[in-house]
Amino acid sequence: AGAISTGGGGMIERGESWKFRSHLQETNLYADQVVEHLITGATAHRRVFTEAATRDDAFLSAVKRQIEDTAEFEHPAFPRVFLCESVHNHFCVIGELVEGNTLSSLTLQKKFSDRVVWAETALKIVRMLEEFEELGLAFDRLTLQTLTIQRDFVRVARRFPVGCLRPGKPPEEPFLK
């Protein structure tokens, strides 16, 4: 059940169907990578949790609950999750790769020095967050590194901002008045 036939007599085991391409970032809890699917050639974002994170039952439970709670959430600005699996005894989540410049890097490059451009971008962020709120998804925090500009469209850069993403009814008061 865990293997995929390649048609040529070889088998690809779960966790071996994605080929590492490059590192995105590394923290003490996980490493983010760009991977390529061996059969389809599609690229994706893979978050590989460290051994310590994988052994922490409470942490891993929270991550899995967050993924499960948001599995049905669909919005063009929110990356899709494709697969959760174990690779070499490390919990991994594979999802849509969102490419583009983060708002943090654009700010450092002074791309928002024009107040009108910054105001237009801020308005796009507000509209996206309002749409998320209407759909029942709330963020406890978002940073400039969490958001990406992709063809003049604001997107969440990574689906797994652990600890800050939660489903549920919209707050009693809207985040904007």
Image (tube, rainbow, N blue to C red):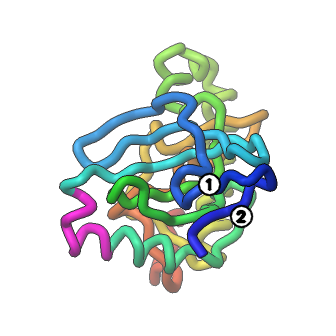
Disc 2 element: loop
Amino acid, disc 2: His
In magenta segment, residue 156: no
Task: Assign the N terminus to one quadrant of the image.
Answer: bottom right
Q: State left or right for residue 64 relative to residue 54.
A: right
Residue appearing at x 62%, y 67% in the figure: 132
Residue appearing at x 50%, y 23% in the figure: 105
Q: State left or right for residue 17 relative to residue 175.
A: right
Residue 136 position by quadrant: bottom right
Amino acid, disc 1: Ile
Dot 1 corresponds to which residue?
Answer: 12
Q: Is residue 154 visible?
A: no
Magenta part of the protein: which range? 53-61
Residue 133, percent from left and from top: 58, 72
* Front position in the image: 10 or 48: 10
Name of the residue lying farthest toward the front: 9
> Is the stretch drawn in magenta largely helix, strand or loop?
helix
Q: Is residue 169 above or below residue 124?
A: below
| Marks 1 and 2 close (CB-CB < 8 Å) | no
Dot 2 corresponds to which residue?
Answer: 75
* Front position in the image: 124 or 34: 34
The mark found on residue 131 in the picture is none
